[in-house]
Image: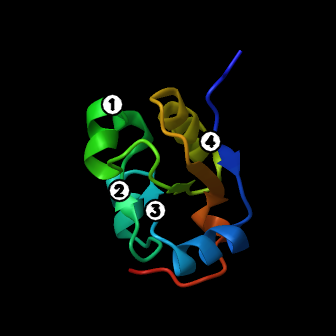
Amino acid sequence: MNESSYQQIAQEAAKEMMDTQEVVILDVREQHEYDSGHIPGAILLPVGTITEDTAATVIGELDTVALVYCRSGNRSKTASQALADLGYTNVYEFGGINDWPYEIKE
């Protein structure tokens, strides 16, 4: 059985990927949370709005590297699984912005 899934990675690994390759950073929180501070370059895609169409608009190709985070790490897991279920093959979940030790953009 080939069950689609995503990978969980450490925040350090996510940061290294952001710095060294082409990635799409997805913030799956709500608009007001995003507005109060997000990882530079992150695109807002609230977990409740993920569909084949919204994902295709934001991410593009199914093999695009997508790095997913939320506030504490719960919604990012739900969102990552939703993306994997839609056929995305390079989804990496790295937890919540609460634990992000790097730059945050206001």
What's the coloring here?
Answer: rainbow
Dot 3 and dot 2 residues touching (CB under 8 Å) = no
Along the polypeptide, which appears first: circle 3 or circle 2? 3
In the rendered picture of this protein, how many numbered marks are placed on residues? 4
User: Considering only vertical position in the picture, is 74 above or below 26?
Assistant: above
Identify the residue under disc 4.
77
Q: Residue, x 47% and y 46% (percent of image)? A: 63
**Of labels 2 and 1, the one closer to you:** 1
Identify the residue under disc 1.
52
Identify the residue under disc 3.
25
Q: The residue under label 1 is which amino acid type?
A: Glu
x and y percentages locating residue 105 in the rendered image: 42, 81
Secondary element under disc 2, as helix, strand or loop, is strand
In the drawing, does residue 78 fall left or right of residue 57?
right
Along the polypeptide, which appears first: circle 1 or circle 4? 1
Identify the residue under disc 2.
44
Q: CA distance from mark 1 to mark 4?
A: 17 Å
Residue neighbourhood size for the residue with mark 1, other residues' Cα within 10 Å, grouped as few (<14), some (14–19), many (≥20)? few
Secondary element under disc 1, as helix, strand or loop, is helix
Q: Residue, x 32% and y 48% (percent of image)? A: 60
Residue 69 is drawn in which quadrant? bottom right
